[in-house]
Amino acid sequence: MARRGGAPEVNAGSMADIAFLLLIFFLVTTTIETDAGLDRKLPPDEPPKDNVVIKQKNIFTVEVNKDNQLLVENELMELKDLRAAAVKFLDNGGGTGEKGEKCDYCKGARDPESSDHPNKAVISLVNDRLTKYSTYIAVQNELVAAYNELRNREAERLYGTDFTTMEADFNDPKTSDAVKDELKPKIERIQEMYPQKLSEAEPKKN
């Protein structure tokens, strides 16, 4: 009886097909996490046609130095106090009524040396190049929270719900078009009452 030559070979074609199908399965089902960024609108490339003159009292200056210290309106301030200071500035309503500067809904001190109207109030943020990223984010969060605090107050007064909830519902893909159409003018009205004018200057060199 003749002996068979060599061991039988294993057909690897089926295993290759299975490996390919598994690869496709993992590519389709795997979720890749991405870091969340800050929502900011970049300025246009073209300079404005008209030179806009902003009164110094309508500018709220926040500087962060290389030691991560806050200098707000030329005075040292703790991070925990920044939100309240920004709210006080934005909600001051010190306008006298000239050129539409009177704010009927502001509840601030109406200090003539501070901002005239939320539409004219600008927060200027300047960082040092050596400022920690965590400090930069924390300062940003406090400033945005100041806007949200005022927007929530007015949304509660006008519509019985806070602004952040309306905005979240509007951005939710599960929300119906009819509800979004109802929310859109309300959100735009609140944003017009307290527009987010947050300006970031070029970081300072050490």
Image: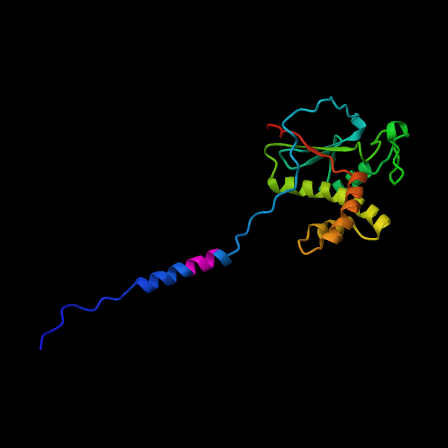
Q: Does the magenta stretch include residue 26?
A: yes
Q: Which of 197 and 112 is in front in this view?
A: 197
Expressed as whole percent of the image width and height from the top left, the position of residue 116 reads 84, 31
The reply to whether residue 35 is in sight is yes
- Identified at 68% across, 40% down, the residue is 140
Expressed as whole percent of the image width and height from the top left, the position of residue 60 reads 76, 32
81 left or right of 28 in image: right
Question: Which image quadrant for residue 194?
Answer: top right
- Identified at 53% across, 55% down, the residue is 31
Expressed as whole percent of the image width and height from the top left, the position of residue 2 reads 9, 75
What residue range appears in magenta?
22-27
The single residue placed furthest to the front in the displayed view is 178
Question: Which image quadrant for residue 176?
Answer: bottom right
Q: Nearer the viewer, residue 105 or 124?
A: 105
Q: Is residue 48 above or below residue 140?
A: above
Expressed as whole percent of the image width and height from the top left, the position of residue 138 reads 67, 43
- Identified at 66% across, 36% down, the residue is 41
Magenta residues, dominant SS class = helix
90 left or right of 127 in image: right
The reply to whether residue 149 is in sight is no
Q: Which colour scheme is used?
A: rainbow
Q: Which of 49 and 182 is in front in this view?
A: 182
Q: Quadrant of the C terminus?
A: top right
The single residue placed furthest to the bottom in the displayed view is 1
Q: How many labels does the image show?
A: 0
- Identified at 83% across, 38% down, the residue is 91
The single residue placed furthest to the left in the displayed view is 1
Q: Quadrant of the N terminus?
A: bottom left
